[in-house]
Image: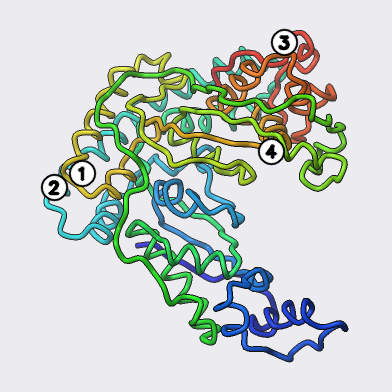
Amino acid sequence: MIKVSLVNWPAKNPVESISHAAKVCYEDTAPEWGKTIDIEGRLWNTGHHTTFQHFFCTFLIEDIAVGDITFGIHLANPFYNTSQRSGRFCAKMFANPDKKKLEKYVENYWSGLENREEVMDYIMLGTDIYQSSFEKAVEKAEKFIVEERPNATDKYINQNTPKIAQEQLRMFIPVIFPTALEYTVNISALAAMYAVSWSPAMKDATQKMVGLVLEKWPELDFLFGHRQEKESSVVKKCDEFLGVRKKPVVGIKNAGDPAIFNVPHRNELHPLDLLHFSPRLMGNNTQEIKTEVELSVATMGQDQRHRTVRRSNPRFTGHFYLPPIPDSLGLEKEAKQMFIRWASLGSKIPSSLHTVLAPYGAMVGYEKSASYNAAVHELSKRLCFCAQEEIYHLALSLRESLGENHPVTRIMAPNCVLAGRCGEGARYCGRDIGKTKENPFPERKV
């Protein structure tokens, strides 16, 4: 069962806040705080909703499936801020799965499921593969770190080998596993999310958020009068296994007009990103790089963090992503087995359940559209060695597809490449920064 807590909100009353914002627009002197207007009749019903966006709430959402975040709360809405439990850094996420808790989640949101036992057997298959391979994966992770990052300290190696092993082995884990996140959203965005919620868990999570808001401010009940009740499917299925991929795929559809690009200065990138704030760089927002990508569900969750990038509806492609560590352990057969078992459930269970049962390694495809500023921001972060292996190679593939002559690629790099020093502080990865000029973007295994 999803748990939702309201943990932060503005100190002022929302009706007063919204009224004050509106009166600033309508009056020629600064309005007096506390004087209110008919915010429902004058603002909400007439579509003047930006005034409502001055009021926000922060929720702690616990025990929600990873898939109900990736294919639910984070899928289409860019108007939020999230801090989500990491599938790399939280080392116990997959170590000791609570089967009863997972089964209860299935029963709560898809009650009366006739083949629940088959569903649970499939979930446990993924955890069995993960657990039986973990110790060897840790050994491989240590070996690869030493090879790729010669300056990594013993402390770094000891801390990160189990995390990287978990990150890559989770490809066999279904995304119905629980996570937690702190989620900040303005009040009109919450109303829109509540209205369009398409899956059982998303409906429940938004209902609980709305319930907490109305418990504290019942005068806002008019915001939440409309909701689609019917469940809808947002991801196109592919029940045929088409093979294993060992790299994500990027195809460029449009690279914009390079002549428009105004090159950002280094101090506009790090430590404070000024790309979307500097008037000097506004022209970069008029040109876009449009791509078609194919990547794992795990990396789709990472990709969604870049909210200035627009994305189309995802679709399952029929491929399974096998990262370097499980590939080196010879787990390709298990990848195929996991995909086929998941696909076989497609005609037997509701589509929303089938979606959140996808293994992290199931690959999805969708279109992306990023302005030059958004692309530079994304790729300068993702070409860092601290980014996970797959999203690094996704960014590298785009950089190589654009070519060295495209002016955007000249600035698509982390701080160690651009400035010759690590920008990650204590999280320095241990790569040989002295060699970044001769080989700035090597192939990676971890």
Of all residues, the one furthest to the left in this rendering is 114
Task: State the residue position of label 3.
Answer: 439
Left or right placement of residue 64 versus residue 282 in this view: left
Q: Which mark is residue 119?
A: 1
Q: CA distance from mark 2 to mark 3?
A: 53 Å
Q: Amino acid at mark 3?
A: Asn
Q: Secondary structure at mark 2?
A: loop
Q: Secondary structure at mark 4?
A: helix
Considering only order in the chain, which callout, 1 or 3, is on the residue closer to the N terminus?
1
Q: Amino acid at mark 1?
A: Val
Q: Amino acid at mark 4?
A: Ala
Q: Secondary structure at mark 3?
A: loop
Q: Is there CB contact under 8 Å for labels 2 and 1?
A: yes
**Which residue is rendered at x = 73% and y = 37% of the image?**
373
| Depicted 62 relative to depicted 46: above or below | above
Q: Is there CB contact under 8 Å for labels 2 and 3?
A: no
| Depicted 164 relative to depicted 203: above or below | above
Near-viewer residue (182 or 152): 182
Task: State the residue position of label 4.
Answer: 374
- The 10 Å Cα crowd at callout 1, few under 14, some 14 to 19, many 20 or more, is many
Task: State the residue position of label 2.
Answer: 115
